[in-house]
Image: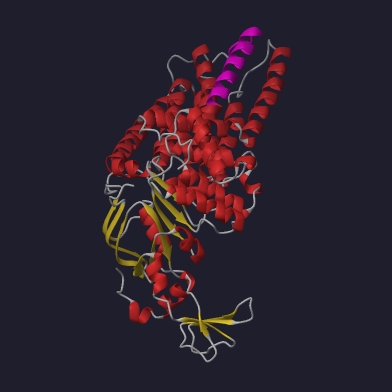
Amino acid sequence: MSAGLLERPAAPAQTLALRSLAALEARRYARSPLFLIGVSLLVWTTTVATGDLAKNAATADPGDLDLLPAFCLGLLGVFVGHQLTRSLDGADEALGATPSDRVRRTAALCLACLVPGVVALVWVGWMSAALAMWRIPLSASISSGARAAMLLSGAVCAVGGPLFGVLVARWTRFPGSALVAVVVLAGWTLLSPRSAAWVAGGSPGWYLAYLVLLCGLAASAALFPGSTGPRRTRVLRVLGSLAVVAVVCLVLAVLPDPARIPL
Amino acid sequence: MNTTASVELTGITKRYRGTTALEGVDLSLRPGITGLLGPNGAGKTTLLRILATVLAPDAGVVRLLGRVPTSAEALAEIRRRLGYLPQEMGFPRGFTGFAFVEYVAVLKEWTARDSRHEEVRRVLDLVDLGDVATRRVRALSGGQRRRVGLAQALLGAPDLLLLDEPTTGVDPEQRVSLRQVLSTAGERSTIVLSTHQTEDVAALCDRVVVLDRGRILFDGSVRDLVGTARGRVWLADAPDPQARASWRTGTGRHRNVGALAPRGSEPTEPTLEDAYLLLLGGRGQTTGVAA
């Protein structure tokens, strides 16, 4: 075609192609204005919260600090995941004629949702350091392991929110579906057995496992549209297995943990 | 030049809720540029979408680049060698021209960053967008956006290049420039150019397919189609009500297409547009003439 024509690449391994696409989607995620707002909000609220903890170290209660990444990165992440998924709808026909099918593109978007997870993990490290530095005592009812699980559950929610956004974008077409998803997610969180379970002596560890499985469910369900043949069967099988294990984890999470002293 | 058929369609039929878009279309294409003409709703876009593997026919056999796109592997293999510019193309907010073409390059499995960037720059230069590659696509003019779309289709010098109205909104200078790009590409690739611009087809294509109401009305060389209008186009001082089409030209004389020679008229060399008008005008008689 021209003198400087490059050789078309040979078919790369599936994982390599997915990795390249995921890296590109991760860059898009990291540059999303809403994500940057969420990170700023997280830094600001955490700075204020840890400052308060430092001032009242003896009597401080870290309480529901783990909700911060869930709110700042997870809830806002629903919009980010949704927006990233739908942003290329206009070019869908051209993109559909490339060797990267919809399933691969969705998988790359799901991997990009790890970006807020990485930020949330940094936050977990920050919080753990702050709690240790100011020797903030653990609550009588919560062990250090449970405390770590609670902090980590915030990080998992930071990933789960955007995954839910991708899922909603792949399954719905109506305008405002992201907003509806956020309302549903917020309602689900408020009505979930989480807070009550801790008070009753439930297990944050199992709850963390349950949240991880919910993330897996969201990703699998997002991959379902567009998958065909044996791949569709595989996705269905994974969805079913994850759902069963998630229910088991939830039951274990709300059952009283014998290792803990309920309040 | 490779002379094996890149596209082989047999009995392709496609219907949308009772409306027939394509009816038993047979087509075989080899490297070179084929123009696809037809009125709105003739089935051109449906045909291109089937060739681009984004739409499956209801009936018939499709063979592209030697493979039948039924399995995921065959689809991926075909798509690696395919470039497609759809009729309508939206661009995501915030993307620059470079970023958008690079995104498509990643989807086309250019995994090595350096060679990918080099290829993206090459295709952007081909469509004369090298200077504005870092500007947001939404800030570009309609013609420039169309060229961004064309650039992504040209990635990797595809063996099968499908272009649905590529010159819409493109200024005359750029159109000529694009013709150069496509004529070079057509030396090694099979290009299907769907358009309403008969002058683009006349300038570029060695073969023309005219579709009407889902059927092929004409399939042959541009010269043969133009030849069907010879002796049926006249310049006269007045419009002829018997003509298929008649209009006043810049010289003040009237061009009468498909008319018997009016008094005082003189025959003139027909264009592809004249032949196309005559073909569609007489479609009641010529349906089934397809080669």
Residue in view at x 46 percent, y 30 percent = A20
Residue in view at x 31 percent, y 47 percent = B2
Q: Is residue B100 above or below residue B12?
A: above
Q: Residue A218's spot in the image, x, y percent? A: 44, 37
Residue in view at x 61 percent, y 46 percent = B137
Q: Is residue A191 visible?
A: no
Q: Is residue B161 visible?
A: yes
Q: Residue B187's spot in the image, x, y percent? A: 40, 48
Majority secondary structure of magenta residues: helix
Q: Residue furthest bottom?
A: B263
Rendered-image quadrant of the N terminus of chain A: top left
Residue in view at x 52 percent, y 32 percent = B117
Q: Is residue A11 above or below residue B176?
A: above
User: Which region is colored magenta?
Assistant: A117-138
Q: Is residue B10 above or below residue B217?
A: above
Q: Is residue B285 above or below residue B182?
A: below
Question: Quick one: A112 or A217, which is closer to the camera?
Answer: A112
Question: Quick one: A6 or A85, which is closer to the camera?
Answer: A6
Q: Residue A193's spot in the image, x, y percent? A: 49, 32
Question: Quick one: B287 or A70, which is closer to the camera?
Answer: B287
